[in-house]
Every structure is written in structure tokens, then in C-alpha cells.
Image (spheres, helix red, strand yellow):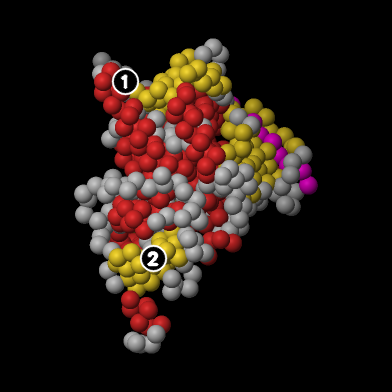
């Protein structure tokens, strides 16, 4: 016989908390949303040990009245709905009045707040749902909530938390989305004392995205604006040149709340069909404004799932609007378009501390090449782990030859038999550009960007197909790692090995590289290695895949490409163009500059008034 018990209140609270609060990132999301609702225009998020030890969210919003402070922590306490009449329009925005109660049930919370009208602030402390302090306190206007020891009283849930680093990454991603949801709010995110994200709060979405994804992607975002049946769509969507290996950068917002929706993802990807390769996903930040009674954001306790009443309209709106943008010159920079991609954005400041992706080297080319040859001759023995001695020797010869060809600027042999587009090379301009006729269009190709693009794609293909080779480094290169680099290396060790690295432990916080990938061109082994580590760490935010790491390596490798005004003869250019035109997306170099601009015959005819 089993007896039925009534659960006590604290148990009920803990169970309810489990629905809303899954991990530190969910706490941050709730607290920041409250700050947004309170009209803040500056929000500061600071976490320690992935937020497991401590989360603090500080805002400059309107604060909480002294006599409401304790009420805010009661379940179903909200200032945002008063009665059932308001329910329909407001509950759909996601107010449930239980976030603070839930958080306080499973952690130690301190809230300090002050409104504009009161002379002093209030401070309240709650531990595991129990109020332990309530007093007046000096405070600036706004609210600061500190959450310590999350799940300290729910060991099962605590056990399910991941490492602090992983939890920090989830928080970071959440803050990025929150910052995107409100470009007009200035966000600052700090983890373990390290500043990870700062947004300007200027209201400029492109600038916000640049802060999050970097300037290259920021420059490649195309504006979307459309409306249909009272639904307004706005935002930025990436040119196919900046696609990703997963959906992590597809960001959707409904009425400025973060949402997840398969409907939206599917519609977006449908629009990109034919523009991106298979298994590549767009980057976007798209905003839908819909009357509250036609959308339900509240079907899930964490409010992240969304349901629309008019799914077909939403779907069609996205597909049509995004397609139109992609078809309208997102790929090739059209000469006649008054504001071509890449020019309108030039005025946007690059975020401080981000360096340009292709730093100019002043070293004359010969000097760099000489150094490279020396490297090849003296300290590098080319080999491949699973080869016989004779194969190894053959490969060494082949690779030295290949490297030689690399130095000769362009490989002259026809690269492959992929069906490329047919074209006619007309000649060179200013020692930098090439004029090409193809398919009723005049293309002006930037030889430097084109070469970079080809090296990039080829390196990437080689890495993907594991056609990599290693070169021994003697003596081994000893590299000191930061704790974070070490952590990243541990997570991606396999990938590094696949790329051709051989890594030995070397005392405390250092490793010795005994072999590195052979196709580094003239890059320094050490800087490439650490740059990949740092990059991987950054990109763990977007769940770094082996693809991303490979892309990074390819992008670094192709920096060895020729500089803009090097003379290239016609034969070399012809070989280069053949390879360029056989690429899936020949239009942008990996650093985001266009490889070519285009003017169609119709445009020329128009300019000469042959047609009107
Ligand atoms: P909800 O946001 O659904 O109303 P919460 O439990 O998240 O429920 O918050 C309860 C109430 O506490 C809010 O309705 C609001 O009045 C108040 N509140 C919470 N955080 C803040 C904040 N940062 N600034 C001002 N008021 C806040
Ligand atoms: Mg709330």
C-alpha cells in the first residue's frame, strides 16, 4: 500500500524551479529579461566559474519599490499583469511571474534595488526560498541581482551541470542573443574577470553583430525588410559567403524576445537553397513583429519555443524576403548598385581590440620566400605517418616541388576537371585587376583576392579529405599554454592530430610540437598553433566543429597569397581563373573582400543608351 503525501512548499518550489532554471544560462536569461522589462539601457552580466559559483546582473532600469521587493520573489508575483483581462496580450510576451521565485528556491540570492523616487535603496537576501534579510541600503538607481551557489540545495541538478567552462559558454551565447534582441541596450559580459563581450547600445544591429561575430561577418550581412498580413520582418541575413557548419548562428526574435522555431529555421534555409552548399547554414538575426494575439511565446516554461497562429504567412514572408535579398546582389558586387555590399558598412567602426584579419606584412616577398626555402631545406623533413619509406621520399620530393610552385605564385597546370564556367580573359588593368568576359557579363577580378580564395578552398579541401601531411620540427617547438588554451587543446586534440600536428606534453602548462602540418606556407608554426587554439576557444561559443577549425587553418594559410600589385602573366592568370570559376562561390575571398565585381551587358547597354 502506498500512502499519498502532500509535498511541502519548498519541495514544490524546487520542482517548479526545475522547469524554468536548467543551468546558469537560464538564470542569466531570466535576470536580463527582467532588466530589459525594467527599461534599462545598460546591462552588465558578470559570472564566476561558469555562473555556478556566482552570477550578477546589474541594470540601470526603474528598480523595484521598497514595499514590493519581497513580493517580487513570491511565485506568480508579477508587476506585468494585474488581472485575467490583461492575460491574453501580456502573457503571450512571456511573463509568468515565477522566475525570481524559482531562482531563489534553488540558490542564494541577493537583490539590491533603488527607484528614481526613493532616497535610499533596498536589499533583500533569500536562501533556498527563505528570506534571511530585508533592509534599506545605499544603492544607485536600478537593480542588481546576485545569485550564488546555484542548486546548492538540489544536489541532483547540480550534478547535471557541465564544467564551468561549458556553462560559461552557454551563458556567453545567451548574452549574445540577448544583446542581439536589443541592439539599443549596451551590454557588457565578464566571465572570471575577463571581458568577453561589449555592445555599444547604439541601436545599430550591424554594429552589434560585428561586436559578436567580428567585422568580416558584420560586413557580409544583408538587410532584410518586408511585411505581410500585419507581420513585419526586419533584420540582417548573411551573404552565402559567410555560411556556417551548423544552425548556431540562426537567430530569430519575435517581438524582441529570443525564440526557437523550426518553422523559422526551415523557412530561412529554404530561402538559401541554391545559394549555399549542402550542410551549410546561414547566419542571421531576424526580427518578427506580430500582434500579441497571433503568437504564443509562452508554451514552454523557458519561453523559448514559439507558436504562430498564421504559420503559412510567416513562412512565406521569410522565404520571399530573404530570397529577394540574396537575388539582389548579395553575391557579386554590382558596379551599378549605388550602395554595394562592403561600402555602406565602411563607416562602421571596428570593435576595439579586434585586429584586421589580413595584417599587411612589409617584408619584401623575396625575403619571405627565402626564409621559407631555408625552412624547407634545413629544418623540415617531410613525411607522412602511415607511409612506407619510399612513399615518404616520393612525397617529400612532390611536396618540395609543390611548395616551389607555390612560390612561383600560381600553379600553372589545369587544376581539375570540374566543369567550370566558360570565360574569355581580356587583359590586365593597373597590374592588379583582370578583365574577364563571361556569360554576357564583364567581370573585374582582383588577382590578390582571387588567389587567396583559391588557396583557401584548396587548403580546406586538402584538410577535409585528410590529404594533409606533417613536417617534423627539430628541435621540437615548446609552447606555453594558458589554462584556456590547454583546455581547448584537450577537447580538440584529435582534430589537431588529424591536421598533422604531433603534440607531446612538456612539463607544467606547456607542450612540445614535434610535427606540424606541412602546408603552412610561410606561416610561423607557433603563431598558427596558438591562433587556432584561441580561435577554437572563441568558437566553442558556437560549438566549434572540426569544420570551423579547418576553415580557420585554411584562412590563415592563404595569407601567403600574392600581394595586389605583383605582375602575373596571362597564362598564370588563365590557370587561376579556371580554378576560380569552378568554385561553388567564387565571389568573395575568405577575408570577406569581393574577388570580383560585375557589370552585365544590359547595364552597359543602358549606360550607352542603347536600351532604356
Ligand atoms: P515576471 O518577469 O514574469 O514578472 P519575475 O519573477 O521575473 O516575473 O519578476 C517578478 C517581478 O519582479 C517583475 O514583475 C518585476 O516587477 C520585478 N523585477 C524583477 N527584476 C526586476 C528588475 N531588474 N528591475 C525592476 N523590477 C524587477
Ligand atoms: Mg521575469
Q: Position of residue 93 (x, y in %)?
A: 45, 53
Q: Are marks 2 and 1 in contact (CB under 8 Å)?
A: no
Q: Main secondary structure of the magenta part?
A: strand
Marker disc for residue 563: none
The residue under label 1 is: 385
* Classed neighbour count for the residue bearing mark 2: other residues with Cα under 10 Å, few (<14), some (14–19), many (≥20): few
Instruction: State whether residue 389 is above or below residue 139.
Output: above
* Rendered residue at 36%/53% (across/down): 572
Q: How many marks?
A: 2
Q: Nearer the viewer, residue 422 or 533?
A: 422
Front: mark 2 or 1: 2
Determine the image quadrant of residue 190.
top right
* Rendered residue at 38%/45% (across/down): 455
**Does the residue tagged 2 have its C-beta within 8 Å of any atom of ligand 1?**
no
Instruction: State whether residue 601 is above or below residue 609.
Output: above
Secondary structure beneath label 2: strand
* Classed neighbour count for the residue bearing mark 1: other residues with Cα under 10 Å, few (<14), some (14–19), many (≥20): few
Marker disc for residue 427: 2
Magenta residues span: 119-128
Q: Nearer the viewer, residue 256 or 374?
A: 374
Q: Position of residue 167 (x, y in %)?
A: 48, 30
**Does any portion of residue 290 appear in the rendered image?**
no
Q: Earlier along the polypeptide chain: callout 2 or callout 1?
A: 1
Amino acid at each position: 500500500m502506498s500512502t499519498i503525501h502532500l509535498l511541502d512548499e519548498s519541495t514544490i518550489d524546487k520542482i517548479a524551479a526545475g522547469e524554468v532554471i536548467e543551468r546558469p544560462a537560464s538564470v542569466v536569461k531570466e535576470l536580463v529579461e527582467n532588466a530589459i522589462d525594467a527599461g534599462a539601457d545598460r546591462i552588465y552580466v558578470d559570472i564566476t566559474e561558469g555562473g555556478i559559483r556566482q552570477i550578477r546582473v546589474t541594470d540601470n532600469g526603474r528598480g523595484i519599490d521598497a514595499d514590493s521587493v519581497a513580493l517580487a520573489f513570491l511565485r506568480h508575483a508579477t508587476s506585468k499583469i494585474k488581472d485575467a483581462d490583461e492575460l491574453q496580450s501580456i502573457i503571450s510576451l512571456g511573463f509568468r511571474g515565477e522566475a525570481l521565485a524559482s531562482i531563489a528556491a534553488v540558490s542564494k540570492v541577493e537583490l539590491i534595488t533603488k527607484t528614481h523616487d526613493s532616497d535610499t535603496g533596498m536589499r533583500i537576501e533569500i536562501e533556498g526560498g527563505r528570506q534571511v534579510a530585508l533592509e534599506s541600503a545605499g544603492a544607485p538607481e536600478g537593480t542588481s541581482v546576485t545569485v550564488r551557489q546555484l542548486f546548492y540545495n538540489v544536489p541532483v541538478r547540480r550534478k547535471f551541470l557541465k564544467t564551468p567552462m561549458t556553462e560559461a559558454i552557454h551563458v556567453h551565447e545567451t548574452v549574445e542573443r540577448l544583446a542581439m534582441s536589443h541592439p539599443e541596450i549596451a551590454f557588457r559580459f565578464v566571465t572570471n574577470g575577463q571581458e568577453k563581450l561589449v555592445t555599444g547600445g547604439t541601436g545599430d544591429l550591424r554594429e552589434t553583430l560585428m561586436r559578436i561575430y567580428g567585422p568580416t561577418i558584420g560586413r557580409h550581412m544583408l538587410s532584410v525588410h518586408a511585411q505581410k498580413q500585419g507581420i513585419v520582418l526586419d533584420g540582417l541575413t548573411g551573404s552565402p559567403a559567410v555560411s556556417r557548419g551548423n544552425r548556431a548562428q540562426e537567430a530569430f526574435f519575435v517581438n524582441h524576445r529570443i525564440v526557437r522555431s523550426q518553422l523559422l529555421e526551415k523557412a530561412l534555409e529554404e530561402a538559401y537553397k541554391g545559394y549555399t552548399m549542402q550542410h551549410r547554414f546561414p547566419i542571421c538575426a531576424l526580427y518578427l513583429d506580430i500582434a500579441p494575439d497571433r503568437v504564443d511565446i509562452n508554451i514552454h516554461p523557458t519561453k523559448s519555443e514559439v507558436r504562430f497562429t498564421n504559420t503559412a504567412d510567416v513562412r512565406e514572408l521569410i522565404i520571399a524576403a530573404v530570397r529577394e535579398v540574396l537575388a539582389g546582389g548579395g553575391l557579386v558586387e554590382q558596379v551599378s548598385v549605388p550602395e554595394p555590399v562592403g561600402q555602406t558598412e565602411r563607416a562602421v567602426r571596428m570593435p576595439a581590440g579586434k585586429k584586421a584579419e589580413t595584417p599587411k606584412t612589409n617584408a619584401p616577398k623575396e625575403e619571405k620566400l627565402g626564409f621559407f626555402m631555408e625552412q624547407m631545406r634545413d629544418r623540415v623533413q617531410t613525411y607522412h605517418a602511415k607511409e612506407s619509406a619510399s612513399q615518404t621520399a616520393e612525397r617529400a620530393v612532390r611536396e618540395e616541388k609543390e611548395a616551389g610552385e607555390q612560390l612561383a605564385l600560381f600553379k600553372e597546370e589545369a587544376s581539375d576537371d570540374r566543369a567550370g564556367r566558360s570565360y574569355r580573359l581580356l587583359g590586365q588593368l593597373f597590374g592588379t585587376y583582370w578583365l574577364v568576359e563571361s556569360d554576357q557579363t564583364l567581370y573585374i577580378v582582383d588577382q590578390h583576392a582571387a588567389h587567396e580564395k583559391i588557396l583557401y578552398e584548396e587548403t580546406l579541401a586538402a584538410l577535409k579529405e585528410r590529404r594533409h601531411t606533417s613536417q617534423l620540427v627539430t628541435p621540437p617547438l615548446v609552447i606555453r599554454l594558458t589554462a584556456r588554451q590547454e583546455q581547448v587543446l584537450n577537447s580538440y586534440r584529435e582534430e589537431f592530430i588529424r591536421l598533422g600536428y604531433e603534440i607531446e606534453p612538456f612539463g607544467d602548462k606547456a607542450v612540445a610540437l614535434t610535427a606540424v602540418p606541412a602546408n603552412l606556407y610561410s606561416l610561423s608554426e607557433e603563431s598558427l598553433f596558438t591562433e587556432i587554439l584561441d580561435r577554437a576557444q572563441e568558437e566553442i561559443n558556437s560549438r566549434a566543429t572540426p569544420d570551423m577549425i579547418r576553415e580557420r587553418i585554411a584562412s590563415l594559410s592563404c595569407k601567403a597569397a600574392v600581394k595586389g600589385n605583383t605582375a602575373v602573366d596571362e597564362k598564370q592568370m588563365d590557370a587561376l581563373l579556371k580554378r576560380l570559376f569552378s568554385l561553388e562561390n567564387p565571389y568573395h575571398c575568405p577575408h570577406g573582400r569581393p574577388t570580383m565585381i560585375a557589370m552585365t551587358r544590359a547595364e552597359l547597354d543602358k549606360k550607352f543608351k542603347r536600351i532604356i
